[in-house]
Amino acid sequence: MLEGTGLTPVHQKHPDRVFDVGIAEQHAVTFAAGLATQGIKPIAAIYSTFLQRGFDSVVHDVVVQDLPVVFALDRAGFVGDDGKTHQGFIDVSYLRCLPNMVVSAPKDERELRDLLYTGVRHNGPFSVRYPRGSGPGAPTDQPMREIPIGRAEVLREGTDVTLLGFGTTVAECVKAADILDEEGISAAVVNARFAKPLDADLILEWARRTKGIVTAEENVRAGGFGEGVLDLLAEHELADRFLLGLTMPDAIVDHGPQPTFRKIWELDGAGIAARTREAIQHLSLPKPTAESGVSDPLPTT
């Protein structure tokens, strides 16, 4: 999969440091684990949708031994014209449940480089997921920097609601905040960077500073980033501050352009803004009382 993962030019420059095992993902993971036991820091570049075929090896050969293997997961989220078999819709779910595994996603090209650099320097299992295609256009000619694991960043402050994006949705959350600002709704935007470990202090702080949190991710709801945030809030008796979790659908997404599916499933800027507006409006509705919330019983005969 040298062409698909973008490793062809790397292989040309370093032919003795790139190994193409075809579509034998389980072997690729075990091979990487073996290299890691010998002091090497391997990077396993595998499509998100196909790493699931190597899941057993991820668990037993990497995670159980806490080995420093970096998983670079291409085609995460809506994959576009590659078709339904390539949709990267569950990798956050099946990786976030694993002990020792770091689960990360960049907001742009520069952060992808930084997270990959961070993963190589980390002494344990590390995954970074990123989408197919081009990014927002961040510069890639600057020195790479190590990002503190589990540290999010506030991109924009706000007072009404917090938009917490993971990966590709961060840029859409910024667009949504602009839309909401025009409507008089002040939205903070946070780039989560990590689904595991979460930046608990920052998330709890913004859950308290605003009316609540809206999460956005290109992964299914079950076991995803949003569920992790909800669990965190619930542990601190702040579950009522989880306003909305926007995710990929509980369905097999078909063939089609990425922007189209982001629009359909309300994971673009306009969709996130619309759903957030609805959630805030719902907060302002009067809560049902015992009298108003119970309908009259059916008449008896």
Image: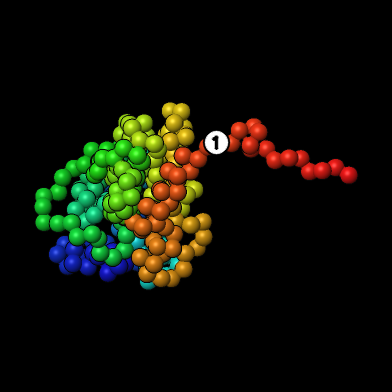
Quadrant position of residue 123: top left
How many discs mark residues in the rendered view? 1
How was the colour assigned to the protein in this rendering?
rainbow
Residue 226 screen position, x and y as percent = 42, 44
Residue 192 screen position, x and y as percent = 31, 43
Residue 230 screen position, x and y as percent = 45, 38
Q: Residue furthest right?
A: 301
Whether residue 228 is visible? no
| Quarter of the C terminus within the rendering | top right
Q: Residue at point 20% right, 65% down?
A: 11
Q: Name the residue under label 1.
A: 287
Q: Residue at point 36% right, 41% down?
A: 161
Residue 157 screen position, x and y as percent = 26, 40
Q: Residue at point 19% right, 53% down?
A: 110
In the image, 261 versus 76, the foreground residue is: 261
SS of the residue under disc 1: loop
| Quarter of the N terminus within the rendering | bottom left
Quadrant position of residue 238: top left
Q: Alpha-carbon neighbours of circle 1 within 10 Å: few (<14), some, or many (≥20)?
A: few
| Amino acid type, mark 1 | Lys
Q: Residue at point 61% right, 33% down?
A: 289
Whether residue 274 is visible? yes
Q: Which residue lies furthest to the top in this view?
A: 236
In the image, 68 versus 299, the foreground residue is: 299
> Can you say whether 1 is above or below 246 in the image?
below
Q: Which residue lies furthest to the left in this view?
A: 142
In the image, 220 versus 196, the foreground residue is: 220
